[in-house]
Amino acid sequence: MSVREQVAGDFIADVVRADLASGRTRVQTRFPPEPNGFLHIGHAKAIITDFAIAEQFGGTCNLRFDDTNPDTEETEYVDAIVEDIRWLGFTPERVLYASDYFEQLYAWAEYLVGQGLAYVDDQDVETISAQRGGYGKPGIPSPYRDRSVPENLDLLRRMRDGEFPDGSRCLRAKIDMQAENMQLRDPVMYRIRRSHHHRTGDRWCLYPLYDWAHGQSDAIEGVTHSICTLEFVSHRPLYDWFLEHLPLPYEKPQQLEFARLELTHTVTSKRRLLALIADGVVDGWDDPRMPTLRGLRRRGYPPAAIRAFCEAIGVNKTNSRHSLEELESYVRTSLNQTAPRRMAVLRPLRLVLDNWPKDAEGKPVVEWFEIPNNPERPEEGTRRVPFTGELYIEQDDYAEVPPPKFYRLAPGREVRLRGAYLITATSRVLDTCERVAEVHATFDPATRGGDAPDGRKVRSTMHWVSAAHALKAHVALYDRLFTAEVPGERTGDPADDLNPASRELLTECFVEPALGGPTAPGETVQFERLGYFAKDDRSPMLFHRTVGLRDEWAGLQKRQA
Ligand code: ATP
Ligand code: MG
Protein backbone atom coordinates (compact mmCIF):
# COMPACT_ATOMS: atom_id res chain seq x y z
CA MET A 1 0.00 0.00 0.00
CA SER A 2 1.19 3.49 -0.73
CA VAL A 3 -0.26 4.93 2.47
CA ARG A 4 3.31 5.58 3.51
CA GLU A 5 4.37 8.19 0.98
CA GLN A 6 1.02 9.97 1.02
CA VAL A 7 0.87 10.57 4.72
CA ALA A 8 4.57 11.35 4.91
CA GLY A 9 3.88 14.96 4.05
CA ASP A 10 1.11 15.63 6.53
CA PHE A 11 1.14 17.58 9.76
CA ILE A 12 0.52 14.60 12.04
CA ALA A 13 3.54 12.87 10.59
CA ASP A 14 5.53 16.08 11.15
CA VAL A 15 4.60 16.10 14.84
CA VAL A 16 5.52 12.45 15.25
CA ARG A 17 8.80 12.97 13.47
CA ALA A 18 9.62 15.91 15.75
CA ASP A 19 8.74 13.80 18.81
CA LEU A 20 11.07 11.08 17.68
CA ALA A 21 13.81 13.62 17.10
CA SER A 22 13.39 14.99 20.61
CA GLY A 23 13.59 11.75 22.51
CA ARG A 24 10.51 9.59 22.02
CA THR A 25 11.68 6.13 21.12
CA ARG A 26 8.59 4.43 19.74
CA VAL A 27 5.27 5.07 18.01
CA GLN A 28 1.98 3.44 18.93
CA THR A 29 -1.49 4.50 17.82
CA ARG A 30 -4.98 3.15 18.29
CA PHE A 31 -8.34 3.29 16.57
CA PRO A 32 -10.90 3.77 19.36
CA PRO A 33 -14.49 3.19 18.18
CA GLU A 34 -17.43 3.16 20.49
CA PRO A 35 -19.25 -0.10 19.69
CA ASN A 36 -22.61 1.62 19.28
CA GLY A 37 -23.02 1.31 15.53
CA PHE A 38 -21.33 0.20 12.35
CA LEU A 39 -18.28 1.91 10.88
CA HIS A 40 -18.76 4.44 8.10
CA ILE A 41 -16.52 6.09 5.53
CA GLY A 42 -15.47 8.73 8.09
CA HIS A 43 -14.17 5.99 10.35
CA ALA A 44 -12.26 4.56 7.39
CA LYS A 45 -10.41 7.86 7.21
CA ALA A 46 -9.52 7.61 10.91
CA ILE A 47 -8.48 3.95 10.61
CA ILE A 48 -6.25 4.65 7.63
CA THR A 49 -4.63 7.60 9.42
CA ASP A 50 -4.02 5.63 12.62
CA PHE A 51 -2.54 2.64 10.83
CA ALA A 52 -0.55 4.72 8.36
CA ILE A 53 1.20 6.73 11.07
CA ALA A 54 2.12 3.55 12.92
CA GLU A 55 3.34 1.90 9.73
CA GLN A 56 5.30 4.92 8.59
CA PHE A 57 7.31 5.06 11.82
CA GLY A 58 7.71 1.34 12.38
CA GLY A 59 5.17 1.32 15.21
CA THR A 60 1.97 -0.54 15.93
CA CYS A 61 -1.73 0.26 15.93
CA ASN A 62 -4.30 -1.37 18.21
CA LEU A 63 -8.03 -1.51 17.99
CA ARG A 64 -9.50 -0.33 21.27
CA PHE A 65 -13.19 -0.39 21.96
CA ASP A 66 -14.22 2.67 23.91
CA ASP A 67 -16.95 0.71 25.62
CA THR A 68 -17.80 2.95 28.54
CA ASN A 69 -21.47 3.51 27.80
CA PRO A 70 -23.39 0.27 28.38
CA ASP A 71 -26.74 1.74 27.28
CA THR A 72 -25.90 1.87 23.58
CA GLU A 73 -23.21 -0.73 23.11
CA GLU A 74 -23.52 -4.27 21.88
CA THR A 75 -21.37 -7.26 21.06
CA GLU A 76 -22.90 -7.37 17.59
CA TYR A 77 -21.20 -4.04 16.84
CA VAL A 78 -17.89 -5.21 18.30
CA ASP A 79 -17.78 -8.19 15.94
CA ALA A 80 -18.84 -6.12 12.95
CA ILE A 81 -16.17 -3.48 13.61
CA VAL A 82 -13.42 -6.11 13.82
CA GLU A 83 -14.64 -7.59 10.54
CA ASP A 84 -14.95 -4.24 8.77
CA ILE A 85 -11.42 -3.17 9.72
CA ARG A 86 -10.10 -6.44 8.34
CA TRP A 87 -12.11 -5.93 5.15
CA LEU A 88 -10.60 -2.47 4.77
CA GLY A 89 -7.22 -4.17 4.76
CA PHE A 90 -5.83 -3.61 8.26
CA THR A 91 -4.87 -5.95 11.07
CA PRO A 92 -4.72 -4.44 14.53
CA GLU A 93 -1.76 -5.45 16.63
CA ARG A 94 -4.13 -6.15 19.52
CA VAL A 95 -7.86 -5.86 20.19
CA LEU A 96 -8.44 -4.11 23.51
CA TYR A 97 -11.34 -2.79 25.56
CA ALA A 98 -11.56 0.26 27.80
CA SER A 99 -13.84 -1.83 30.03
CA ASP A 100 -10.81 -3.97 30.92
CA TYR A 101 -9.47 -0.93 32.77
CA PHE A 102 -12.55 -0.22 34.89
CA GLU A 103 -10.82 -1.52 38.02
CA GLN A 104 -7.68 0.55 37.41
CA LEU A 105 -9.70 3.64 36.58
CA TYR A 106 -11.64 3.27 39.79
CA ALA A 107 -8.41 2.92 41.80
CA TRP A 108 -7.14 6.13 40.17
CA ALA A 109 -10.40 7.87 41.04
CA GLU A 110 -9.85 7.02 44.72
CA TYR A 111 -6.32 8.35 44.31
CA LEU A 112 -7.57 11.70 42.97
CA VAL A 113 -10.11 11.89 45.81
CA GLY A 114 -7.26 11.25 48.23
CA GLN A 115 -5.33 14.12 46.68
CA GLY A 116 -8.30 16.42 47.12
CA LEU A 117 -8.68 16.55 43.32
CA ALA A 118 -12.10 14.93 42.98
CA TYR A 119 -15.35 15.10 44.91
CA VAL A 120 -18.75 13.50 45.06
CA ASP A 121 -21.56 15.81 43.97
CA ASP A 122 -25.11 15.07 45.15
CA GLN A 123 -26.72 17.15 42.43
CA ASP A 124 -28.28 15.83 39.26
CA VAL A 125 -26.67 16.35 35.85
CA GLU A 126 -29.12 19.09 34.81
CA THR A 127 -28.19 21.19 37.84
CA ILE A 128 -24.51 20.55 37.29
CA SER A 129 -24.62 21.56 33.66
CA ALA A 130 -26.66 24.71 34.48
CA GLN A 131 -23.99 25.68 37.03
CA ARG A 132 -21.20 25.22 34.54
CA GLY A 133 -21.88 28.64 33.04
CA GLY A 134 -20.61 29.55 29.59
CA TYR A 135 -18.20 31.78 27.74
CA GLY A 136 -18.01 34.99 29.75
CA LYS A 137 -20.50 33.49 32.18
CA PRO A 138 -18.99 32.41 35.50
CA GLY A 139 -19.37 28.88 36.76
CA ILE A 140 -21.15 28.32 40.07
CA PRO A 141 -19.26 26.02 42.45
CA SER A 142 -21.26 23.07 43.68
CA PRO A 143 -22.28 23.25 47.36
CA TYR A 144 -20.57 19.85 47.70
CA ARG A 145 -17.26 21.00 46.23
CA ASP A 146 -15.46 21.30 49.55
CA ARG A 147 -16.37 17.98 51.09
CA SER A 148 -13.58 16.41 53.12
CA VAL A 149 -11.43 13.68 51.67
CA PRO A 150 -12.76 11.01 54.10
CA GLU A 151 -16.37 11.92 53.29
CA ASN A 152 -15.69 11.82 49.53
CA LEU A 153 -13.93 8.48 49.81
CA ASP A 154 -16.75 7.01 51.85
CA LEU A 155 -19.37 8.24 49.38
CA LEU A 156 -17.42 7.06 46.33
CA ARG A 157 -17.10 3.56 47.80
CA ARG A 158 -20.79 3.47 48.62
CA MET A 159 -21.57 4.65 45.09
CA ARG A 160 -19.56 1.74 43.78
CA ASP A 161 -21.31 -0.64 46.17
CA GLY A 162 -24.65 0.34 44.74
CA GLU A 163 -26.06 2.19 47.73
CA PHE A 164 -27.46 5.10 45.73
CA PRO A 165 -30.01 5.29 42.95
CA ASP A 166 -29.04 5.97 39.33
CA GLY A 167 -28.13 9.58 38.64
CA SER A 168 -28.39 10.63 42.26
CA ARG A 169 -24.69 11.39 42.64
CA CYS A 170 -21.59 11.66 40.53
CA LEU A 171 -17.85 12.02 40.92
CA ARG A 172 -16.31 15.23 39.59
CA ALA A 173 -12.75 16.36 39.08
CA LYS A 174 -11.94 19.44 41.15
CA ILE A 175 -10.23 21.67 38.67
CA ASP A 176 -11.45 25.23 38.12
CA MET A 177 -15.05 26.45 37.96
CA GLN A 178 -13.88 29.68 36.29
CA ALA A 179 -11.65 28.08 33.66
CA GLU A 180 -12.05 29.61 30.24
CA ASN A 181 -12.23 26.12 28.83
CA MET A 182 -15.61 24.68 29.83
CA GLN A 183 -14.19 21.16 29.85
CA LEU A 184 -12.12 22.11 32.90
CA ARG A 185 -15.06 23.33 34.99
CA ASP A 186 -15.11 20.32 37.28
CA PRO A 187 -16.03 17.68 34.68
CA VAL A 188 -17.99 14.61 35.67
CA MET A 189 -15.84 11.48 35.88
CA TYR A 190 -18.33 8.85 37.00
CA ARG A 191 -22.07 8.52 36.94
CA ILE A 192 -24.25 5.94 38.65
CA ARG A 193 -26.03 3.83 36.09
CA ARG A 194 -27.46 0.34 36.49
CA SER A 195 -27.14 -1.04 33.04
CA HIS A 196 -25.90 -4.37 31.71
CA HIS A 197 -22.51 -4.04 30.04
CA HIS A 198 -21.66 -6.27 27.09
CA ARG A 199 -18.44 -7.39 28.77
CA THR A 200 -18.53 -6.58 32.47
CA GLY A 201 -22.17 -7.63 32.86
CA ASP A 202 -23.72 -6.28 36.07
CA ARG A 203 -20.46 -5.94 37.97
CA TRP A 204 -20.50 -2.15 37.84
CA CYS A 205 -23.13 0.44 38.55
CA LEU A 206 -20.55 3.19 38.11
CA TYR A 207 -19.46 4.03 34.57
CA PRO A 208 -16.63 6.38 33.55
CA LEU A 209 -17.27 9.22 31.12
CA TYR A 210 -15.27 9.53 27.91
CA ASP A 211 -12.71 12.02 29.22
CA TRP A 212 -12.03 10.04 32.35
CA ALA A 213 -11.47 6.83 30.39
CA HIS A 214 -9.80 7.82 27.15
CA GLY A 215 -6.40 9.24 28.05
CA GLN A 216 -5.89 6.73 30.85
CA SER A 217 -6.68 3.87 28.48
CA ASP A 218 -4.18 5.29 26.01
CA ALA A 219 -1.55 5.47 28.76
CA ILE A 220 -2.16 1.94 30.02
CA GLU A 221 -1.74 0.57 26.52
CA GLY A 222 1.40 2.53 25.77
CA VAL A 223 -0.15 4.70 23.08
CA THR A 224 2.24 7.48 22.12
CA HIS A 225 0.04 9.44 19.71
CA SER A 226 -3.70 9.51 20.31
CA ILE A 227 -5.14 10.71 17.03
CA CYS A 228 -8.73 11.93 17.03
CA THR A 229 -10.98 14.43 15.30
CA LEU A 230 -11.18 18.20 15.79
CA GLU A 231 -14.15 18.20 18.16
CA PHE A 232 -11.72 16.94 20.80
CA VAL A 233 -9.40 19.94 20.63
CA SER A 234 -11.16 21.53 23.60
CA HIS A 235 -10.85 18.25 25.51
CA ARG A 236 -7.07 18.16 25.18
CA PRO A 237 -6.32 20.24 28.33
CA LEU A 238 -8.50 17.85 30.31
CA TYR A 239 -6.84 14.84 28.69
CA ASP A 240 -3.50 16.27 29.82
CA TRP A 241 -4.75 17.30 33.28
CA PHE A 242 -5.80 13.77 34.21
CA LEU A 243 -2.53 12.32 32.98
CA GLU A 244 -0.49 14.91 34.86
CA HIS A 245 -2.31 14.34 38.14
CA LEU A 246 -2.15 10.56 38.19
CA PRO A 247 0.79 8.46 39.37
CA LEU A 248 1.28 7.00 35.91
CA PRO A 249 4.08 4.51 35.52
CA TYR A 250 3.80 5.09 31.78
CA GLU A 251 5.09 7.54 29.22
CA LYS A 252 2.38 10.14 28.59
CA PRO A 253 0.48 9.90 25.31
CA GLN A 254 -0.13 12.97 23.20
CA GLN A 255 -3.48 13.83 21.64
CA LEU A 256 -3.45 15.07 18.02
CA GLU A 257 -6.52 16.20 16.13
CA PHE A 258 -7.45 16.21 12.44
CA ALA A 259 -10.54 17.13 10.45
CA ARG A 260 -13.48 14.77 10.15
CA LEU A 261 -14.19 13.45 6.70
CA GLU A 262 -17.58 14.48 5.41
CA LEU A 263 -18.98 13.67 1.97
CA THR A 264 -21.55 15.45 -0.14
CA HIS A 265 -25.00 13.94 -0.63
CA THR A 266 -24.76 11.77 2.46
CA VAL A 267 -24.53 11.89 6.24
CA THR A 268 -21.81 10.34 8.38
CA SER A 269 -22.92 10.26 11.94
CA LYS A 270 -24.14 7.11 13.57
CA ARG A 271 -27.13 8.96 15.00
CA ARG A 272 -28.22 10.19 11.57
CA LEU A 273 -27.59 6.82 9.96
CA LEU A 274 -29.63 5.15 12.65
CA ALA A 275 -32.48 7.59 11.93
CA LEU A 276 -32.46 6.54 8.24
CA ILE A 277 -32.94 2.95 9.32
CA ALA A 278 -35.57 3.77 11.94
CA ASP A 279 -37.53 5.84 9.42
CA GLY A 280 -37.44 3.03 6.87
CA VAL A 281 -35.56 5.15 4.33
CA VAL A 282 -33.03 2.36 3.89
CA ASP A 283 -33.23 -1.35 4.65
CA GLY A 284 -30.49 -1.47 7.28
CA TRP A 285 -26.86 -0.73 8.08
CA ASP A 286 -25.72 -2.63 5.00
CA ASP A 287 -28.15 -1.08 2.56
CA PRO A 288 -25.98 -0.35 -0.50
CA ARG A 289 -26.96 3.32 -0.28
CA MET A 290 -25.46 3.69 3.19
CA PRO A 291 -21.99 5.25 3.62
CA THR A 292 -21.21 2.49 6.11
CA LEU A 293 -18.39 0.12 5.27
CA ARG A 294 -20.97 -2.68 5.19
CA GLY A 295 -23.10 -0.73 2.76
CA LEU A 296 -20.16 0.18 0.54
CA ARG A 297 -18.95 -3.41 0.57
CA ARG A 298 -22.36 -4.73 -0.45
CA ARG A 299 -22.51 -2.05 -3.11
CA GLY A 300 -19.26 -3.42 -4.55
CA TYR A 301 -16.78 -0.72 -3.50
CA PRO A 302 -13.27 -2.23 -3.46
CA PRO A 303 -11.47 -1.49 -0.18
CA ALA A 304 -8.45 -0.43 -2.25
CA ALA A 305 -10.52 2.39 -3.76
CA ILE A 306 -11.58 3.63 -0.32
CA ARG A 307 -7.96 3.58 0.81
CA ALA A 308 -6.76 5.38 -2.31
CA PHE A 309 -9.41 8.08 -1.85
CA CYS A 310 -8.57 8.62 1.82
CA GLU A 311 -4.87 8.80 1.06
CA ALA A 312 -5.41 11.25 -1.77
CA ILE A 313 -7.48 13.71 0.28
CA GLY A 314 -4.83 13.63 3.01
CA VAL A 315 -5.09 14.65 6.63
CA ASN A 316 -6.58 18.10 7.09
CA LYS A 317 -6.60 20.68 9.87
CA THR A 318 -9.93 22.23 8.96
CA ASN A 319 -13.26 20.53 8.41
CA SER A 320 -14.38 20.28 4.83
CA ARG A 321 -16.67 18.23 2.68
CA HIS A 322 -15.38 16.10 -0.14
CA SER A 323 -17.51 15.31 -3.13
CA LEU A 324 -19.02 11.89 -3.47
CA GLU A 325 -18.06 12.03 -7.15
CA GLU A 326 -14.41 12.13 -6.13
CA LEU A 327 -14.82 8.94 -4.12
CA GLU A 328 -16.72 7.38 -7.02
CA SER A 329 -13.94 8.23 -9.42
CA TYR A 330 -11.54 6.17 -7.29
CA VAL A 331 -14.03 3.32 -7.31
CA ARG A 332 -14.31 3.51 -11.08
CA THR A 333 -10.55 3.64 -11.61
CA SER A 334 -10.02 0.65 -9.35
CA LEU A 335 -12.81 -1.42 -10.91
CA ASN A 336 -11.74 -0.59 -14.42
CA GLN A 337 -8.56 -2.53 -13.62
CA THR A 338 -10.08 -5.46 -11.80
CA ALA A 339 -13.70 -6.02 -12.82
CA PRO A 340 -14.40 -8.80 -15.32
CA ARG A 341 -16.57 -7.68 -18.25
CA ARG A 342 -19.94 -9.32 -18.68
CA MET A 343 -23.06 -8.68 -20.71
CA ALA A 344 -26.44 -7.97 -19.16
CA VAL A 345 -29.59 -6.45 -20.55
CA LEU A 346 -31.50 -4.39 -18.02
CA ARG A 347 -34.58 -3.42 -20.05
CA PRO A 348 -34.89 -6.20 -22.60
CA LEU A 349 -36.17 -6.01 -26.16
CA ARG A 350 -36.42 -9.22 -28.15
CA LEU A 351 -34.27 -9.38 -31.30
CA VAL A 352 -34.94 -12.17 -33.83
CA LEU A 353 -32.44 -12.95 -36.58
CA ASP A 354 -34.62 -14.21 -39.42
CA ASN A 355 -31.78 -15.82 -41.39
CA TRP A 356 -30.23 -17.67 -38.42
CA PRO A 357 -29.54 -21.31 -39.36
CA LYS A 358 -31.31 -24.35 -37.88
CA ASP A 359 -29.73 -27.72 -37.21
CA ALA A 360 -30.81 -31.12 -38.65
CA GLU A 361 -33.60 -31.37 -36.06
CA GLY A 362 -34.90 -27.93 -36.91
CA LYS A 363 -33.59 -26.29 -33.74
CA PRO A 364 -31.66 -22.98 -33.94
CA VAL A 365 -27.89 -23.50 -34.01
CA VAL A 366 -25.98 -22.36 -30.93
CA GLU A 367 -22.66 -20.69 -31.55
CA TRP A 368 -20.13 -20.00 -28.79
CA PHE A 369 -17.95 -16.91 -28.84
CA GLU A 370 -14.74 -16.46 -26.91
CA ILE A 371 -14.99 -12.98 -25.46
CA PRO A 372 -12.20 -11.35 -23.40
CA ASN A 373 -12.87 -11.02 -19.68
CA ASN A 374 -11.09 -7.71 -19.60
CA PRO A 375 -9.79 -6.09 -22.78
CA GLU A 376 -7.44 -3.98 -20.60
CA ARG A 377 -5.88 -7.13 -19.17
CA PRO A 378 -5.49 -9.90 -21.74
CA GLU A 379 -4.01 -12.13 -19.01
CA GLU A 380 -7.53 -12.41 -17.55
CA GLY A 381 -8.41 -14.69 -20.45
CA THR A 382 -11.71 -15.17 -22.18
CA ARG A 383 -15.07 -16.75 -21.48
CA ARG A 384 -17.46 -18.60 -23.77
CA VAL A 385 -20.69 -16.80 -24.51
CA PRO A 386 -23.56 -18.51 -26.36
CA PHE A 387 -25.23 -16.85 -29.34
CA THR A 388 -28.37 -17.92 -31.22
CA GLY A 389 -31.04 -16.43 -33.47
CA GLU A 390 -33.10 -15.03 -30.59
CA LEU A 391 -31.46 -12.45 -28.40
CA TYR A 392 -32.19 -9.64 -25.99
CA ILE A 393 -30.89 -6.14 -26.51
CA GLU A 394 -31.64 -2.95 -24.55
CA GLN A 395 -34.87 -1.16 -25.41
CA ASP A 396 -32.78 2.02 -25.53
CA ASP A 397 -30.66 0.57 -28.28
CA TYR A 398 -33.48 0.58 -30.81
CA ALA A 399 -35.33 3.60 -32.16
CA GLU A 400 -38.20 3.37 -34.58
CA VAL A 401 -37.50 6.95 -35.64
CA PRO A 402 -33.88 7.65 -34.69
CA PRO A 403 -33.28 11.14 -33.29
CA PRO A 404 -30.19 13.06 -34.49
CA LYS A 405 -26.92 11.47 -33.32
CA PHE A 406 -28.64 8.19 -32.50
CA TYR A 407 -26.34 5.62 -34.11
CA ARG A 408 -27.73 2.46 -32.57
CA LEU A 409 -30.23 0.11 -34.16
CA ALA A 410 -33.00 1.58 -36.34
CA PRO A 411 -34.99 0.31 -39.31
CA GLY A 412 -32.66 -0.60 -42.17
CA ARG A 413 -29.51 0.22 -40.17
CA GLU A 414 -26.53 -2.07 -39.59
CA VAL A 415 -24.83 -2.31 -36.17
CA ARG A 416 -22.41 -4.66 -34.43
CA LEU A 417 -23.42 -7.14 -31.77
CA ARG A 418 -20.38 -7.14 -29.50
CA GLY A 419 -17.91 -9.89 -30.42
CA ALA A 420 -20.47 -11.65 -32.66
CA TYR A 421 -21.91 -10.37 -35.96
CA LEU A 422 -23.05 -7.32 -37.83
CA ILE A 423 -26.83 -7.24 -38.09
CA THR A 424 -29.34 -5.09 -39.97
CA ALA A 425 -32.84 -4.34 -38.68
CA THR A 426 -35.55 -5.31 -41.13
CA SER A 427 -38.94 -5.06 -39.38
CA ARG A 428 -40.58 -4.95 -35.98
CA VAL A 429 -43.66 -6.27 -34.21
CA LEU A 430 -45.83 -3.93 -32.12
CA ASP A 431 -47.72 -5.00 -29.00
CA THR A 432 -51.36 -4.11 -28.30
CA CYS A 433 -50.24 -0.74 -26.91
CA GLU A 434 -48.40 0.08 -30.14
CA ARG A 435 -44.98 -0.33 -28.46
CA VAL A 436 -42.15 -2.17 -30.19
CA ALA A 437 -42.30 -5.71 -28.79
CA GLU A 438 -39.82 -7.43 -31.05
CA VAL A 439 -37.29 -6.40 -33.66
CA HIS A 440 -36.43 -8.60 -36.64
CA ALA A 441 -33.06 -8.43 -38.32
CA THR A 442 -30.68 -10.37 -40.54
CA PHE A 443 -27.08 -11.17 -39.70
CA ASP A 444 -24.18 -11.26 -42.11
CA PRO A 445 -22.42 -14.66 -41.72
CA ALA A 446 -19.27 -13.17 -43.22
CA THR A 447 -18.82 -10.87 -40.20
CA ARG A 448 -18.21 -13.52 -37.53
CA GLY A 449 -16.38 -11.94 -34.61
CA GLY A 450 -17.84 -8.55 -35.48
CA ASP A 451 -15.80 -7.30 -38.42
CA ALA A 452 -16.75 -7.09 -42.09
CA PRO A 453 -14.23 -8.57 -44.54
CA ASP A 454 -14.87 -5.68 -46.92
CA GLY A 455 -13.91 -3.27 -44.17
CA ARG A 456 -17.28 -1.50 -44.03
CA LYS A 457 -17.86 0.39 -40.82
CA VAL A 458 -20.80 0.55 -38.44
CA ARG A 459 -21.19 3.36 -35.93
CA SER A 460 -22.40 1.34 -32.99
CA THR A 461 -21.55 -1.77 -30.99
CA MET A 462 -24.25 -3.14 -28.74
CA HIS A 463 -24.33 -5.70 -25.96
CA TRP A 464 -26.71 -8.64 -26.06
CA VAL A 465 -27.61 -11.92 -24.40
CA SER A 466 -28.93 -15.13 -25.96
CA ALA A 467 -32.60 -15.48 -25.05
CA ALA A 468 -32.37 -19.24 -24.63
CA HIS A 469 -29.34 -19.07 -22.35
CA ALA A 470 -29.86 -15.83 -20.46
CA LEU A 471 -30.52 -15.92 -16.73
CA LYS A 472 -33.19 -13.79 -15.17
CA ALA A 473 -31.90 -11.23 -12.70
CA HIS A 474 -32.93 -8.32 -10.55
CA VAL A 475 -30.84 -5.20 -10.76
CA ALA A 476 -30.90 -2.34 -8.26
CA LEU A 477 -29.88 1.04 -9.60
CA TYR A 478 -28.81 3.59 -7.01
CA ASP A 479 -28.67 7.32 -6.95
CA ARG A 480 -27.69 9.86 -4.29
CA LEU A 481 -29.39 9.24 -0.97
CA PHE A 482 -29.81 13.00 -0.56
CA THR A 483 -30.31 15.45 -3.41
CA ALA A 484 -28.60 18.32 -1.56
CA GLU A 485 -24.83 18.41 -1.34
CA VAL A 486 -25.10 19.19 2.35
CA PRO A 487 -28.16 17.33 3.62
CA GLY A 488 -30.17 19.46 6.02
CA GLU A 489 -28.35 22.69 5.21
CA ARG A 490 -31.52 24.56 4.21
CA THR A 491 -33.95 23.45 6.90
CA GLY A 492 -31.78 21.84 9.55
CA ASP A 493 -33.33 18.46 8.86
CA PRO A 494 -31.54 16.15 6.41
CA ALA A 495 -34.83 14.27 5.91
CA ASP A 496 -36.05 17.29 3.90
CA ASP A 497 -33.37 16.60 1.31
CA LEU A 498 -33.93 12.88 0.85
CA ASN A 499 -33.90 11.71 -2.74
CA PRO A 500 -37.16 9.80 -3.23
CA ALA A 501 -35.64 8.01 -6.23
CA SER A 502 -32.45 6.78 -4.59
CA ARG A 503 -33.23 3.20 -5.60
CA GLU A 504 -34.85 1.76 -8.70
CA LEU A 505 -35.31 -1.99 -8.78
CA LEU A 506 -35.47 -3.61 -12.21
CA THR A 507 -36.96 -7.09 -12.12
CA GLU A 508 -37.01 -8.16 -15.78
CA CYS A 509 -33.29 -8.19 -16.51
CA PHE A 510 -31.33 -10.87 -18.35
CA VAL A 511 -27.65 -11.64 -17.80
CA GLU A 512 -25.21 -13.93 -19.58
CA PRO A 513 -24.81 -17.44 -18.12
CA ALA A 514 -21.30 -16.76 -16.75
CA LEU A 515 -22.99 -14.60 -14.10
CA GLY A 516 -24.88 -17.58 -12.69
CA GLY A 517 -21.83 -19.04 -11.01
CA PRO A 518 -20.69 -18.02 -7.54
CA THR A 519 -18.96 -14.69 -7.20
CA ALA A 520 -17.10 -13.77 -4.07
CA PRO A 521 -19.08 -11.31 -1.95
CA GLY A 522 -18.04 -7.89 -3.01
CA GLU A 523 -16.69 -9.09 -6.33
CA THR A 524 -17.78 -6.54 -8.83
CA VAL A 525 -18.19 -6.98 -12.58
CA GLN A 526 -18.63 -4.52 -15.38
CA PHE A 527 -21.84 -4.89 -17.32
CA GLU A 528 -20.60 -3.70 -20.67
CA ARG A 529 -21.77 -0.20 -21.54
CA LEU A 530 -23.80 0.03 -18.31
CA GLY A 531 -21.52 0.32 -15.33
CA TYR A 532 -20.12 -1.73 -12.46
CA PHE A 533 -22.36 -4.14 -10.59
CA ALA A 534 -21.93 -6.28 -7.49
CA LYS A 535 -23.74 -9.55 -7.03
CA ASP A 536 -25.57 -9.69 -3.74
CA ASP A 537 -24.24 -12.27 -1.32
CA ARG A 538 -27.67 -13.15 0.04
CA SER A 539 -30.32 -12.83 -2.65
CA PRO A 540 -29.41 -14.98 -5.62
CA MET A 541 -29.31 -13.12 -8.92
CA LEU A 542 -29.63 -9.66 -7.43
CA PHE A 543 -27.07 -7.16 -8.66
CA HIS A 544 -26.34 -3.75 -7.14
CA ARG A 545 -25.06 -0.97 -9.34
CA THR A 546 -21.79 0.08 -7.73
CA VAL A 547 -21.19 3.07 -9.97
CA GLY A 548 -21.85 4.04 -13.57
CA LEU A 549 -19.15 4.09 -16.21
CA ARG A 550 -19.11 7.86 -16.34
CA ASP A 551 -20.19 10.49 -13.91
CA GLU A 552 -23.80 10.62 -15.08
CA TRP A 553 -24.87 12.74 -12.15
CA ALA A 554 -22.63 15.64 -13.11
CA GLY A 555 -23.91 15.43 -16.67
CA LEU A 556 -27.52 15.40 -15.54
CA GLN A 557 -27.02 18.46 -13.36
CA LYS A 558 -25.32 20.33 -16.18
CA ARG A 559 -28.26 19.58 -18.44
CA GLN A 560 -30.76 20.76 -15.83
CA ALA A 561 -28.85 23.96 -15.16
P1 ATP B 1 -20.33 9.29 14.95
O1 ATP B 1 -20.37 10.78 14.97
O2 ATP B 1 -20.53 8.70 13.62
O3 ATP B 1 -21.14 8.65 16.02
P2 ATP B 1 -18.09 8.97 16.62
O4 ATP B 1 -16.98 9.94 16.55
O5 ATP B 1 -18.99 9.07 17.77
O6 ATP B 1 -18.81 8.97 15.24
P3 ATP B 1 -16.50 6.78 17.42
O7 ATP B 1 -16.84 5.35 17.43
O8 ATP B 1 -16.33 7.46 18.72
O9 ATP B 1 -17.60 7.49 16.56
O10 ATP B 1 -15.25 7.07 16.48
C1 ATP B 1 -14.06 6.36 16.54
C2 ATP B 1 -12.98 7.20 15.93
O11 ATP B 1 -13.31 7.55 14.60
C3 ATP B 1 -12.77 8.50 16.68
O12 ATP B 1 -11.40 8.70 16.87
C4 ATP B 1 -13.36 9.55 15.78
O13 ATP B 1 -12.68 10.76 15.94
C5 ATP B 1 -13.17 8.93 14.40
N1 ATP B 1 -14.18 9.41 13.46
C6 ATP B 1 -15.52 9.34 13.59
N2 ATP B 1 -16.14 9.93 12.56
C7 ATP B 1 -15.17 10.39 11.73
C8 ATP B 1 -15.17 11.11 10.49
N3 ATP B 1 -16.30 11.47 9.89
N4 ATP B 1 -13.98 11.42 9.94
C9 ATP B 1 -12.83 11.05 10.53
N5 ATP B 1 -12.76 10.38 11.69
C10 ATP B 1 -13.91 10.05 12.30
MG1 MG C 1 -17.52 9.28 19.66
Image: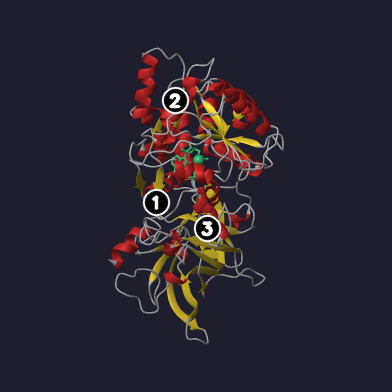
Q: Could you tell me how far apart the alpha carbons at marks 2 and 3 are, in whole angstroms?
A: 37 Å
Marks 2, 3: nearer the viewer: 2
Q: Please tell me whether mark 1 sits on a helix, a strand or a loop.
A: helix
Residue 351 versus residue 485 in the image, above or below:
below
Which labelled disc corresponds to residue 324? 1
Q: Is residue 205 left or right of residue 491?
A: right
Q: Could you tell me how far apart the alpha carbons at marks 1 and 3 are, in whole angstroms?
A: 19 Å
Q: Amino acid at mark 2?
A: Asp
Q: Amino acid at mark 3?
A: Leu
| Circle 3 Cα neighbour tier, 10 Å, few/some/many (<14 / 14–19 / ≥20) | many
The residue lying at 45 percent from left, 28 percent from top is 175
Q: Quadrant of residue 254?
A: top left
| Circle 1 Cα neighbour tier, 10 Å, few/some/many (<14 / 14–19 / ≥20) | some
Q: Is residue 338 left or right of residue 326?
A: right
Tell me the residue that label 3 is attached to. 276
Residue 353 versus residue 499 in the image, above or below:
below
Mark 2 or mark 3: whose residue is earlier in sequence: 2
Q: Could you tell me how far apart the alpha carbons at marks 1 and 2 are, in whole angstroms?
A: 37 Å
Q: Please tell me whether mark 2 sits on a helix, a strand or a loop.
A: helix
Mark 1 or mark 2: whose residue is earlier in sequence: 2
Residue 362: x and y in percent read 64, 73
Label 3 near ligand 1 (CB < 8 Å) = no
Residue 302 is at least partly visible in this image: no
| Circle 2 Cα neighbour tier, 10 Å, few/some/many (<14 / 14–19 / ≥20) | some
Tell me the residue that label 2 is attached to. 240
Residue 125 is at least partly visible in this image: yes
Q: Quadrant of residue 535?
A: bottom right
